[in-house]
Image (tube, coloured by chain):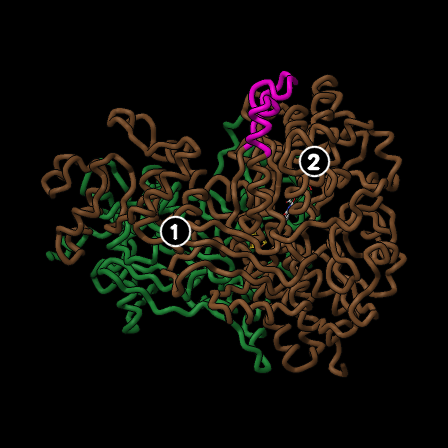
Amino acid sequence: MAAEGAENGADGCQSGCVSFVLRGLAAEDAESGVDGCQFDDMTDIYLGADRATEPEVAAVDAALGARGVDPVVRPETERLYTSGRSRRRERRHFLLPALHALQNAAGWISPGGINYVAEVLDVPPAEAFGVATFYDLFRTEPPDHEGDTFHVCVDAACQIAGYDDLAASVRASGGHVHLGPCLGQCERAPALFVQGSGGRRDYVPADDEPFELPQAGEESLRLLRRIGVADPSSLESYLAHGGYQALRRAGEMGAEAVLEAVAASGLSGRGGAAFPTGIKWRAVAAETGRPKHVVANCDESEPGTFKDRIVMEQDPFAVIETMAIAGLATGAANGWIYIRGEYPLATARLQDAIDAARAAGLLGPDAAGTGHDFDIAIWRGAGAYICGEETALFNSLEGFRGEPRNKPPFPTTHGLFGEPTAINNPETLLNVGDIILEGPDAYRSRGTERSPGTKLLCLSGKVGRPGLYEVPFGTSLGDLLDLAGGVAGNGELQAVLMGGAAGSFVGPDSLSLPLTLEDTRAAGTTLGSGVVMAFDTSDDMTAVVVRIAEFFRNESCGQCVPCRVGAVRQHETLVQMQRRGSLSPARRTLIDEMAEVMVDASICGLGHTAASAVRSALDLGLIASAPSR
Amino acid sequence: MTDTTITETAVTITIDGQPVEVAEGSTIHAACVEAGIDTPTLCWAENLTPVNVCRVCVVELEGSRALVPSCSRPAEEGMVVQTDTPRVRHSRRMVLEFLGSGVDLSQADDLHHWIKAYGADPDRYGTDGHPVERVEEPVKVQDELYIRDYSKCVLCYKCVEACGDDAQHTFAIAVAGRGFDARISTEFDVTLPDSACVYCGNCVGVCPTGALQFKTEYDLREVGEWRPDDQTVTRTVCSYCGVGCNLDLHVQDERIVKVTSPADHSVTSGHLCIKGRFGWQYVHGE
Ligand SMILES: Cc1cc2nc3c(=O)[nH]c(=O)nc-3n(C[C@H](O)[C@H](O)[C@H](O)COP(=O)(O)O)c2cc1C
Ligand code: SF4
Ligand code: FES
């Protein structure tokens, strides 16, 4: 083969000679085929003729160099026993950071840029392209505008706050606007995120405003007690406010006692699915013989949700301290924070916190003197709601398309890199700190028997003081709305969206609903990720629901048929309803039939919940439910 | 099919009330085959790793909230499975309807029987003036060996698997885009001659809908001369190298119109290289 390749002009060509010959014949002139063949530098992959520009190369090298990655250099003999595939697997997870670097350097991901990344990371260019095209923050066509991109949110909270005015004012000042899904700033709607280009950094203009927590300093606060009190940029300040006492205490207790305490506390996951944390951690702890991981799921993209952002921005050390506790309890040494790309301030604060903690011996070998090794790396998402689904998150982090995996097997045995993984929402993790410090009994003194503890709730829409609130489970919906300043707008409550786009609407008759897992479930709704979004009677609920349907249409990963097509057909049906002002009985039945297959046969929770808010709005009569309306 | 006589461990599951014994590690689908229960599949093939994305094979599993894909779910001792409940029939019907509402299934021969059996009506979404988004793209004819017609693509991932990990390890194509806009694509949609493609034709070999077609077949279909009923299939061994790949020569009007390999052949698992697949012109003295 090598001789054949040499004859054809590609010296040292090790593979793909048939393709080389064919390509040489098919191409205009054989020369270009030769130029395109890069087998002489011993990669297994074919790269086209496009080359990266100097700024692109520099950006990728800087991003990878910062993570300790050198280009692939491989002696010929090694190739004989190490297949390209296993080599590729080793570095594939650097694909996402490399694509971010390209996007930021050039304003798009160019063919030359993809080729360079493909070569350095040993990833086939077709796959790198498939990954790049999965994310909203990556462009694979040259930008049609100079400068940064201004992302304006069009989801519910920003919709009723008038995002179009914001978009118009950005445009008027010459900014390029991109309308997109929820940016996790619903308490300060309408929301804006600026994606830097030409090496400029990403930023959120609203981050320049001073931060205020509505309940700041209140005695009752547990998870939020340091916010507005301690300095989020200072390890000393964190330590002065009780920081790292929980990890030290956990070190003294030992893994088994921590697992017992978490199980006894009755803590359940706050990411939406409410799975018991104690059971999850116990399962990971029971796995032996393979590397294990703790992942903080900081993707937070459920429309209406912004709690994790505020926690990460205002109390970043608490997130990394409690991740270390999870590592200790489960026996995992590797911590990963997967954070959505639209959260630049939270990313920076977490990185600073990690650096400071590592320098102080609170991360790394024998972290905080616990005898357990634990360190954390941050991976940035790139605009894809689905990457908050835990198995999609693993794929995304590993450098594959963010497509959920079928379960079983579950993450506790086959998670990140196929290895045992405890994946948790940051709010879940924060609870563990208190459980360790005060013990499960004291922890259970708040909340209800089946929903112990407190809950973070994201109040947005037509309330007096939108923002992040912490209340014990069992607080009624009405009391919560009162706490947030009551119904604003015209003062007449039309509906409340509970749990976000994946949740459901409830009407004004639900104000006495106690906010617990069990009561919301019994009432046919959900707390989900803690979204409580109020609408007054002037809000156009049809427009809101049509947009929710569009959200799912846009955010479906496209892998499985029920969701890929179902979300489109559902949206089309609602657009017609909006246009005609009514929904025929046949179409109403069709919505139920489509919902049934999405719930029953979709791979993941996105498809399972894509019809939930829509159907609740129809059932409540919030949107045209009968021809008469 | 799995040989249960020599395996160490067998598991017994109940399908539609009937006990079925299969080797440990077999799927529910394999157990259905064992029990003689016909089950629709689309993204599954015996020579590829299951990706369980089409969801047409779903069954009801006792204790599971949602339906489960039979093609990938391992059979476990004591499982109780139902394959013909209203829920199962509904999901299968809707999956087929959804597919038919978005892409051209006219050449997805294996599905036609199921579309009928489940009473799927892909046209009902577009009635009463409702606009329906479909995948509509011009056919890609970029070389003399095969064509790609993505308006027929159901995104079963089979071609990607055959090009990649499951057979060829060339990785010339991948899924690009997201949601309904997801498509099988080379990097930046470059033509196949400009991609890593080695023209093994294994992607064409596994395509269930005619989205990927040998150029010979495409040309004959274009002029209305593709007549499968008039074709003979002759099994032979490839004459190029010593590996011993079985070839099935599909012959119409005394000319080879397509070359495939049996999926259960121990050497090829149905996959070939460019020579065996396309190097037959000499047979006709060309
Ligand atoms: C479409 C989808 C999006 C999700 N997004 C998030 C998210 O942004 N953050 C999160 O913590 N969990 C999210 N989840 C839930 C996760 O899959 C997982 O259950 C959670 O991270 C587990 O952590 P917990 O047990 O602490 O809640 C999402 C689930 C689905 C189906
Ligand atoms: S349900 Fe939707 S998001 Fe989830 S795997 Fe299927 S297509 Fe992807
Ligand atoms: S054949 Fe099982 S999901 Fe496609």
Whole-percent x and y of residue A144?
39, 65
CA gap between label 2 and label 1 equals: 35 Å
Q: Using the image, determine if residue A580 lies above or below residue B168.
A: below
Instruction: Write down the residue under mark 2.
Output: A429
**Residue A518 - label:** none
Which residue is rendered at x = 63% and y = 27% of the image? A327
Subunit under mark 1: A
Q: Quadrant of residue A39?
A: top left
Q: Secondary structure at mark 2?
A: helix
* Residue type at numbered disc 2: Leu
Residue A35 left/right relative to A424: left
**Camera-nearest residue between A410 and A197:** A197
* Residue type at numbered disc 1: Phe
* Span shown in magenta: A353-376
**Camera-nearest residue between A470 and A267:** A470
Q: Does the Cβ of the disc 2 residue fall within 8 Å of ligand 1?
A: yes
* Residue B70 visible in rendering: no
Give the number of marks: 2
Which residue is rendered at x = 64% and y = 28% of the image? A324
**Camera-nearest residue between B175 and B273:** B175
Provide the letter of the chain coloured green. B
The numbered mark, 2 or 1, whose residue comes first in the sequence reads 1
Q: Quadrant of residue A536?
A: bottom right
Is residue A476 part of the magenta span, yes or no?
Answer: no
Whole-percent x and y of residue A207?
61, 51
Instruction: Write down the residue under mark 1.
Output: A129
Provide the letter of the chain coloured brown. A
